[in-house]
Image: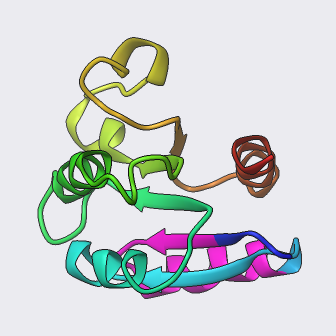
Amino acid sequence: MAKRVLVVDDDMDFQEATGMILKGSGYEVSTAANSAEALDVLNSQPVDLILLDVMMESDTEGFHLAYRIREDEKLKAIPIVMLTCIEEKTGVELDPTKSEDYMPVEAYLRKPLDAKQLKETIAKLTA
């Protein structure tokens, strides 16, 4: 059975491009443009991994959604990969080995995404 990835990003072009990469690698893909849509998907279908953008309707929406997911007993075990270009915009560097105490995600990937790195990260976290 194919693993299902939820892509949460307000950029529809990014959703489409990432979806094509993932579908081409055998993943099922669901999408959401914001936290509310993401929670609707998460509460209505099984998801094996979440690709979560940081900056959507607000500059920190992705962070807040990650915390909500980790506080929900039904969702907290789903791996989250944070997608960001926040470093270029704010100078804040995100690194899971340094940020794990305050940011509950398994990995960070910088935008624009490297397709090979994306697929390797997802394969590792859904194995």
Q: Which x, y percent locates residue 35? A: 24, 72
Name the spot of residue 10 as percent of width and height, x first.
Answer: 33, 78
State how the image is colored: rainbow
Q: For this rendering, which residue is in front, 82 or 47?
A: 47
Tell how many labels. 0
The residue lying toward the viewer, choosing from 125 and 54, is 125
Residue appearing at x 41%, y 75% in the figure: 42
* Magenta: main secondary structure: helix
Query: Looking at this rendering, what residue extends furthest in the left direction?
Result: 58
Where's the N terminus, which quadrant?
Answer: bottom right
**Residue occupying the point 79% across, 81% down:** 23
Q: Residue furthest top?
A: 98
Q: Position of residue 13 (x, y in %)?
A: 51, 85
Q: Residue at point 29% right, 75% down?
A: 39
Which stretch did the figure color magenta?
5-23
User: In screen coordinates, is 84 left or right of 65?
Assistant: right
Residue 120, by quadrant, is top right
Identified at 24% across, 24% down, the residue is 102
Is residue 7 found inside the magenta-colored segment of the image? yes
User: In the rendered image of this protein, does residue 25 appear above or below residue 103?
Assistant: below
Where residue 8 sits, quadrant-wise, is: bottom left
Is 105 a magenta residue? no
Q: Is residue 82 left or right of residue 127?
A: left
Figure quadrant of residue 2 = bottom right
